[in-house]
Image: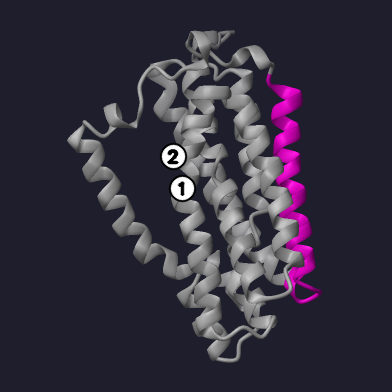
Amino acid sequence: MTIVKTDTADRLPRVFWIVFAGQLVNRIGSMVATFLVFYLTSRGLTVAGIGVVTTALGVGGLLSQPVGGFLADRFGHRLTLIAGMVATAGCMGALGAAQNLPLLAISAAALGFVGDLYRPAAAALVAEVVPLRRRSYAYGLIFWAINLGYPVAGVSAGLLAAHGFWLLFATDAFTCLLFAGIIALGIPATVDRRPAGGRPLVGYRTAFADFRLRWLVILTCGYFVVYSQVFFGLPLAITGAGLPPSSFGPMWW
C-alpha cells in the first residue's frame, strides 16, 4: 500500500482561504449594482436620470481602487478591507433610502467610491501570504470564486426583486458586513507587512513609469466600456421590451 504525502509547501495558507471565502460570499450578495437600472426604473426615473445615477456610480468607482491601494499601504490591508466593506454596507442603505435624483446620484457616487476599496487590499493580502510560485494558482481560484458568485447573485436577485428591491439592498449590505466579519475574525492584525512608519515603498508615479502597465490600464478601460453595457444597456433593453427583472438572471448565468 502506497501512502501519498502532500507537500505542505504546496498547500495554500489559511489566510488565503479566508479571503477566498469572504470574496465568494460578497460576490454572491452583489445584487444592487447589477440590478441598479431595474431599481431606478421602478422608482420612475427617466433614461436621462438613470444615466446621471449610473454615471455617478462610475465616477466614484474610478477613484475607488487607486485610493484603496493607497489606504492599504498606509493603514494596512486588513483594516482597509474591513473598513471598505462596512462603508459599502452603509452606502447601500443610503442609496436605498434616497428619495430624489440628487440624493440618488450622491449616494451612488459614494457607493461607487467605497465599493471597491477592498480590492487592492484583498489582492495584496493574497500576495503576502502565498509563495510566488503558487500565486497564479491562488489568483485563479479567487477569480473562480468571483465568476461563480456573480451568476448566483444574478439569478437570486431576479427572484428577490419580484418581492421588493429592498431585499436586494438588505442582502448586499449583509454580505458586505459578513465579508468584513470573516476578515476581522479570521485574519490576525499582524498579517500586514508594512514599511516602518506605515509609508508605502513605492507610489503610483513609480508604477506608471512602466509602459506595460500604462497600456494594460488603457486596454482594461476599453474593455470595461464595452463590458459595462451588460449592467446598464442590457437592463434598459429588457425593461423596454416589457420583460421583468427576473429575466435578467438567466441571461447573466
Residue beneath label 1, please?
Answer: 63
Please rate how many residues cluster around mark 2, counting C-alpha atoms within 10 Å: few if below 14, some from 14 to 19, many from 20.
some
Magenta stretch, overall SS:
helix
- Asked whether 163 falls inside the magenta stretch, the response is yes
Residue 91, horizontal then vertical, whole percent: 69, 54
Q: Decide if residue 7 is in sight here.
A: no
Q: Which residues are magenta?
A: 160-187
The disc at residue 66 is 2
Say which quarter of the image contains residue 169.
bottom right
Q: Decide if residue 95 is in sight here.
A: yes
Residue 137, horizontal then vertical, whole percent: 44, 29
- Asked whether 242 falls inside the magenta stretch, the response is no
Instruction: Please state which of residues 253 and 188 is positioned toward the viewer in this rendering.
Output: 188
Please rate how many residues cluster around mark 1, counting C-alpha atoms within 10 Å: few if below 14, some from 14 to 19, many from 20.
some
Q: How many marks?
A: 2
Relative side of 147 to 227, left or right? right
The residue at 29%/58% (across/down) is 222
The residue at 79%/64% (across/down) is 167
Dot 2 amino acid type: Pro
In the displayed structure, 142 sits above or below 223; it is: above
Dot 1 amino acid type: Leu
The disc at residue 44 is none
In the displayed structure, 181 sits above or below 114; it is: above
Whether pointer 1 and pointer 2 mark residues with C-beta atoms closer than 8 Å, the reply is yes
Instruction: Please state which of residues 78 and 241 is positioned toward the viewer in this rendering.
Output: 78
**Element type at mark 2:** helix
